[in-house]
Amino acid sequence: MKKNPWNMLKMGVVGCAVLVGVSASVLPVASMASADTVVATSATKAAPVVIKEVVLTSKSTYLTTNIKVPQLTGMLDTKYQDELNDIILSHANKDLASWEKDAADAAAAAKDKGYTYRPYGLTIVYTLKSDGSGQPSGVVSLTVTTYGETGGTGMPRVDTYNVLNAAAAQRVTLQDLLGADYKATVDAGVIAKMKEEPQYFFPDQFKGIDSEQGFYVEKGAAVVVFPKYAIAAGVAGSPEFRFNLPNNVIIKPNPTPQPGTDKVKVELSTGDVEQNADGVSLVPFRKVAEGLGYTVKWNQDTYAAELSKGAQWTSVSVGKDSYFYAKMAPVALGAAPVILNDTLYVPTKFVTDMLKAEVTIDSQGIHIVQ
């Protein structure tokens, strides 16, 4: 009899399984724990985190909605909690505004061309995968699934949030959970499952994971997720690969910065600076953001870039003088991001107004301090 394609694949200390589920997007990475090594002790013992949801509705008659936005409560670091909740709510509001516009445009096109318009739909739901009371201790893991329908069809997007619930909260990464060789570990698991069930997967489309790989934590395992159709046929849904964690893995909280030592500086030469047709000074987005310690994620499909650090989040879109930060309404800065010589540039006001950094300009270049 043919094997169940979703059976567990055992791989020594770490087990890997593929499941039918939703796709995901993610957050970065940090240090190894062997099967019998305790990484460190987590700080204060916290009560389980719980969710309060915010329901969003659309005023548009062209869009039907089922939007439930999770808001975390009970974290030890309330400032981080508030910022993370702002990020999650901001993503939902941005998606709602985008889908309302697309639905209105589609309805207008249908009327103009004389065919029946089928309302678009937007669904946002969530699952608290780990409330911090399980293993690894203190790790809170949340998935938020956004599914838009254009007349009956659509693709899910899953955002994953993995946080250590400590006095100073921090993101939890695959490297924290699987160690310095996490990429090799995950790649090997994915390739092994592809070889085991070749009828479902597209091996040529898998080029290995990167630091932005989506995952969540559930019942002592790191579950690595891929968008639907990314590496497998539609029948496989959105593949998930489960990697069992050693029972005694504990995430080490980052050291608390000492007063006066937490300033980050970025130095730009005059050659790094460009000007647009209106004479507005532009600086390289990635060089500035990564220099200040942010993680940058580029979306080729939308020509947009997101950056995050801790619970801080903002995004920019090429050609649009409209900048987002947390749940603020979009802000115009007088100049849109542009791509010059394969590099994304933003106005210096983005650095001062959105990233809240100090900018000094002199004959040597631009000096940025945050």
Image (cartoon, grey):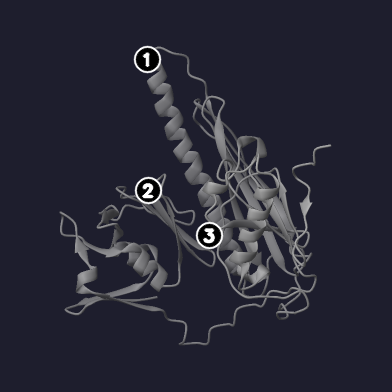
Provide the secondary structure element on which disc 3 rests: loop
Q: CA distance from mark 3 to mark 1?
A: 42 Å
Q: Which residue is mark 1?
A: 113
Kind of residue indicated by mark 3: Glu
Q: Nearer the viewer, residue 209 or 200?
A: 200
Q: Position of residue 91 (x, y in %)?
A: 51, 49
* Residue 71 visible in the shown view: no
Q: Position of residue 122 (x, y in %)?
A: 56, 35
The answer to whether mark 1 and mark 2 are in CB contact below 8 A is no
Q: Nearer the viewer, residue 159 or 298?
A: 298
Of the two numbered discs 3 and 1 on the same chain, state the one appearing first in sequence: 1
Q: Which residue is mark 2?
A: 303
Q: Which residue is mark 3?
A: 212
Identify which residue is drawn at 53% across, 34% down: 58
Identify which residue is drawn at 20% across, 71% down: 271
| Residue furthest out toward the top | 114
Q: CA distance from mark 3 to mark 2?
A: 17 Å
Q: Nearer the viewer, residue 238 or 8?
A: 8
Q: Position of residue 49 (x, y in %)?
A: 73, 61
